Amino acid sequence: MRRLNTILTLGLALPLSLQLAGQAAAETVGSVEAVIGEAHGMPPDGVRRELALATEVVQDEYVETADGGGMTIRFLDGTEFRLGSASSAVLDRFLYDPSAANGDGVVQLGVGAFRFISSAGQPHDGVKIQTPSSVIGIRGTDFVVVIDREKGTALGTVSGLIEVTALRSGQTFEVEPGKLAHIQTDGSVDLDVAPVPVDQLACWLASDEYVCLAQVSADPGAAPGALGNDLGGPDGQDGSGPGPGPGPGPGPGPSDPGDDSGSDPTGGPSDPGSDSGPGDPSSGGGAGDGDPQ
């Protein structure tokens, strides 16, 4: 009887010890610096959690914002990563060596509007941003990415430089400040000059108030400034700018990037379709058509 009790105790303790070991192995890659509305994460242990101010995020964590929300994650090297409304990403990995002042990492973007503002004076050659249709290399940069499942991936650079490789065609190109790139769902690439000044590019391309802001308040109850909701983006612009921001994003959970997705810089992001983006691990869903709820 005693032997049976010992076996049962070990059988119950083993899954718990494995879970704790998995949690201990999850490396911290940054923390939440600001949040508006609701934001959630799913670490490798599979337990969905609310992401509040100062919450640490870990390697391989899936993060998402609710419709109308926004979140800023500050990585260990100081890079600022913003997610706009109904946006999702996987923090695949992020390693930073303070002694060498060098970072190495991969962030997988699902759908939505995003902005990266890399820390000044830090090399970022080892950091890659993956979208369903491209891989982006960073060169001391402030840039915006808008991903829509039906229209493709739109990119615009505010400062610095990004080097982009379109996955389907293999085409490699650079996007300089004030320039735009659109990777269509068929893999073709369009390069153009933004129709607005470079300091308005983020607002015009993202059509998302949180992504647009020059500075983000750390107050979870704060609301972004009113920028207008016409097709031109900021107040005072005509209807030639992008349309409404991204619609409902994918469900929680990482996945490998799929085929091409994003938005059209000349037409702007619209509601996502269903052909790419992270799936929903909580319901066993695969890539492409999860529901953030």
Image (spheres, grey):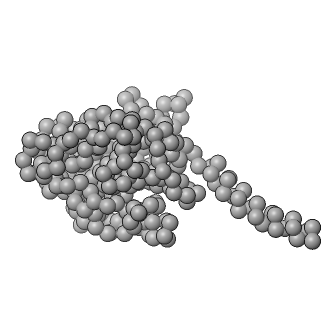
Q: Residue at x 81, y 64 (%)?
A: 9
Q: Position of residue 85 (x, y in %)?
A: 31, 51
Query: Residue at the left extreme?
Result: 238
The picture places residue 51, in percent across and down from the top left corner, at 47, 47
- Residue at the (40%, 47%) spot, across then down: 128
Q: Nearer the viewer, residue 95 or 214?
A: 214
Residue at 48 percent of width and 70 percent of height: 283
Indicate the position of residue 281 as horizontal and vertical percent values.
Answer: 49, 65
Residue 14 at least partly seen = yes
Q: How many marks?
A: 0
Left or right placement of residue 272 versus residue 50 in this view: left
Quadrant of res 14: bottom right
Q: Residue furthest front?
A: 221
Above or below: residue 227 compared with residue 183: above
Nearer-the-camera pick, 82 or 218: 218
For the N terminus, the image quarter is bottom right
In the foreground, 33 or 201? 33
| Residue 152 at least partly seen | no
Q: Residue at coordinates 84% horizontally, 67% vertically from top-left? A: 7
Image position, residue 139 (x, y; %): 34, 38
Q: Quadrant of residue 15?
A: bottom right
Q: Is residue 97 toward the left or the right of residue 202 in the image?
A: right
In the rendered image, the quadrant that contains the C terminus is bottom left
- Between 24 and 182, the one lying in front of the other is 24
